[in-house]
Amino acid sequence: MAWPLNTPLLLLTALMMALAGSASAQSGVTVLGGIHAADLNDKSVQRALDFAISEYNKNSKDEYYSRPEQVMAAEKQVVSGVNYFFNVKFARTTCTKSQSNLDNCPFNDQPKLKQEEFCSYQIYEVPQEDKISVVNYKCRQV
């Protein structure tokens, strides 16, 4: 059975793409469209996480402020903007939402008032246009 003349060219192209992808993954270069672990110390990642926290509390009907007890995963994807993906365990604090300086509120450990939720967020940001939004989120009681 004879191979079409373009088959070796297609195989060579596929091999080159695979090697390029492997090299960029080893060198730490972000591949456009790929989802990669995000550094929580990065200012842009922290800004997106702060936005998710703010949206969580804005949409919560609870009178108490909640903050992340644990960020279980943080990833980002560079597209025409940046998609951030967070898995966060939120816990109720002892502060009501009307108080100031909510970032340092202690978690509520009283059995009747303790409340935890696990949430997955997708945040989309276009930094050059100063736009940020929640694309998708889902929460469940822990």
Image (spheres, rainbow, N blue to C red):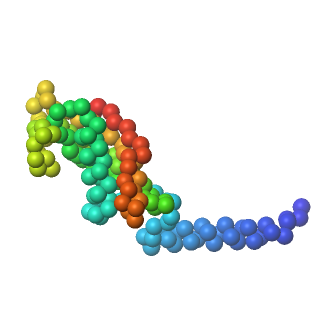
Q: Quadrant of residue 46?
A: bottom left
Rendered-image quadrant of the N terminus? bottom right
Q: How many marks?
A: 0
Name the spot of residue 2 as percent of width and height, x first.
Answer: 89, 64
Q: Residue at x 60, y 67 (%)?
A: 18
Left-right relation of 67 to 128:
left
Name the spot of residue 127 as percent of width and height, x first.
Answer: 38, 62
> Between residues 42 and 36, which one lies in front from this camera angle?
42
> Between residues 91 and 132, which one lies in front from this camera angle?
132
Q: Residue lying furthest front in this view?
A: 129
Q: Quadrant of residue 39?
A: bottom left
Q: Residue at x 29, y 44 (%)?
A: 55
Q: Residue lying furthest top in this view?
A: 112
> Between residues 103 and 74, which one lies in front from this camera angle?
103
Name the spot of residue 133 as percent of width and height, x first.
Answer: 38, 49
Query: Does residue 52 sit above or below 77 in this rendering?
Result: above
Query: Does residue 57 sit above or below 112 in this rendering?
Result: below
Q: Does residue 103 appear in the picture of this structure? A: yes
Q: Does residue 39 appear in the picture of this structure? A: no
Query: Does residue 48 sit above or below 11 in this rendering?
Result: above
Q: Residue at x 16, y 36 (%)?
A: 64
Left-right relation of 17 to 93:
right
Rendered-image quadrant of the C terminus? top left
Q: Residue at x 15, y 39 (%)?
A: 97
Name the spot of residue 71 as percent of width and height, x first.
Answer: 28, 49
